[in-house]
Amino acid sequence: MARILIIEDETAIAELERDYLELSGYEVTIAGDGLAGKRAALEGDYDLVILDLMLPGSDGFEICKAIREAKDIPILMVSAKKDEVDKIRGLGLGADDYMTKPFSPSELVARVKAHLQRYERLVGSGIRENKVIETRGLRIDKTARRVFVNGEEKAFTTKEFDLLTYLAENPNRVFSKDELFRAIWDMDSVGDIATVTVHIKKVREKIETDTSNPQYIETIWGVGYRFKA
Ligand code: CA
C-alpha cells in the first residue's frame, strides 16, 4: 500500500484529502505545519507528498527543495492562489504537479494515482538510481540515507548524516563552524557552533579508523573543517 504524506495547515482540507485518499486504499499521514512536515518528509518512508505552499514554520518552497535534494518521490504542490502556482512552476523546484485550491478531491486522487504509477514504473525499470558519494572506503548513499565504512554500515542521526554529506559533497573546501551550523541546522534551532564540534566528533568516531589522525574530515586550526577528497 502506498504511503502518502499531506503537509497542510488547514485541518479541514487536510482531512478531506485524507478521507478520499484512504477510501482509495492509501495510507495517509497529516503534518499540520512546515517544520513537522519537512521532518516527516525527510525522515519518513513516504511514496508521495502533497505539499501546501503557504505553511507556518517552513514554507512549501523550502520543503519542496529539501525533499528534492534528498529523494525523488513525487511531490504534488497545492496553493490557494493561481499566480503562486505559476510562480512555483517557473522556479523549477522539482515538484511533479501543481493544483490550485479549491480542487475536487476526486481529481486529487486521480493525479496521485497517476504519479504513483509513473513513479513505480521508473523505480521498476531501474532508471531511478541511488545517489552515492564514494571516497576511498567511505560510501554515502544519499537516497537511502545510509553510510558504509569499508562495507560496514554505520548508524547516523539525521544531522550527522547531513553534516557528513554536506562536507563530502564539497570536498577540499574549508568551512567554518558558523557556515556549517547555518547550512545544516534550521535557523531557529537551539544550539550554536559548539553543536558543530560535537557532531564532527561523533561523525569521526564512526568513519575514522584513528580519530586523532582523521583521513576524511580534517581540522583546519582556527578556521574550520575540510573533507579530504
Ligand atoms: Ca496553508
Image: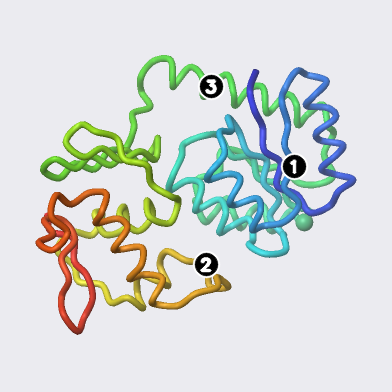
Image region (quadrant) for ligand 1? bottom right
Location of residue 153 in the rendering, given as x and y in whole percent from the top left corner: 29, 35
How many residues crowd mark 3 within 10 Å: few (<14), some (14–19), many (20+)? few
Question: Whole-Å distance between the Cαs marked 2 and 1?
Answer: 22 Å
Quarter of the picture containing the C terminus is bottom left
Amino acid on which the number 3 mark rests in the picture = Arg
Residue 30 is labelled as 1
Amino acid on which the number 1 mark rests in the picture = Ile
**Circle 3 SS class:** helix
Please identify the quarter of the rendering in which residue 1 is found: top right
The residue most toward the right is 12
Location of residue 179 in the rendering, given as x and y in whole percent from the top left corner: 35, 75
- Residue depicted at x 38% and y 27%: 128
Residue pointed to by mark 2 = 186
The mark closer to the camera, 1 or 3, is 1
Residue in the foreground of this view, choosing between 192 and 103: 192
Question: Whole-Å distance between the Cαs marked 1 and 3?
Answer: 23 Å
User: Which circle's residue, 2 or 3, is located before the other in the chain?
Assistant: 3
The mark closer to the camera, 2 or 3, is 2
- Residue depicted at x 75% and y 31%: 108
How many residues crowd mark 2 within 10 Å: few (<14), some (14–19), many (20+)? few
Residue 118 is labelled as 3
Please identify the quarter of the rendering in which residue 215 is found: bottom left
Q: Is residue 187 left or right of residue 228?
A: right
